[in-house]
Amino acid sequence: MEKKRRRWVRWTKTRRATFLDHLAGTCNVKEAAALAGMTPPSVYHLRRRDEDFAEEWHKALLVGYEMLETELLGHVLAGGGDVMERAGGRKISVDTAIRLLGLHRASLQGKKRSGPPLRRALPEDTDAAILKKLAAIDRARARAAEEKNAQ
């Protein structure tokens, strides 16, 4: 069986804007990536390595959840049923919308990691952390040697 060759696709300003706009409208990474002509892994990779993109992603999700909350409130106040139709003709159950908003709110309060992703550490930061750990190991070994000599 012949292996399928991967075709490299570069991020452009248009792809990036398309992804972020759709993410803001749906909060759906998979759909937003597909619409931009990218794969979810490439989107997550870009978010990890590009702090500006990560911040734009976070802002897009905040807008998306605000929009969902507004649509849900309008649906409930209008006496809507168990299923609401979102912008673009997408349907979502009221229970699912409430659950998503609850998860989002919990993530903003730090109960579940979300928000801006963790930043990649700078080489100076990792070097300092490694040196600190090595110093702690050296101190522990020196204490162990002292205790052994004392016996």
Image (tube, rainbow, N blue to C red):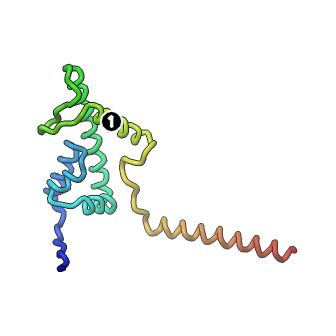
Q: Residue furthest right?
A: 151
Q: Nearer the viewer, residue 61 or 12?
A: 61
Q: Which residue is drawn at the image coordinates 43% and 45% (left, top)?
A: 112
Is the residue 137 above or below the residue 108 in the image? below
Across and down, in percent, residue 98 comes to: 31, 32
* Residue 79 shown left or right of residue 55 in the figure: left
Q: Quadrant of the C terminus?
A: bottom right
* Residue 46 shown left or right of residue 15 in the figure: right
Question: Can you tell which quarter of the image residue 86 is in?
Answer: top left
Q: Which residue is drawn at the image coordinates 43% and 63% (left, top)?
A: 121
Q: Nearer the viewer, residue 9 or 134?
A: 9
Q: Which residue is mark 1?
A: 101
Is the residue 89 above or below the residue 116 in the image? above
Q: Residue furthest bottom?
A: 2
Across and down, in percent, residue 94 comes to: 26, 31
Across and down, in percent, residue 15 comes to: 15, 57
Badge 1 amino acid:
Leu
Across and down, in percent, residue 137 comes to: 65, 71
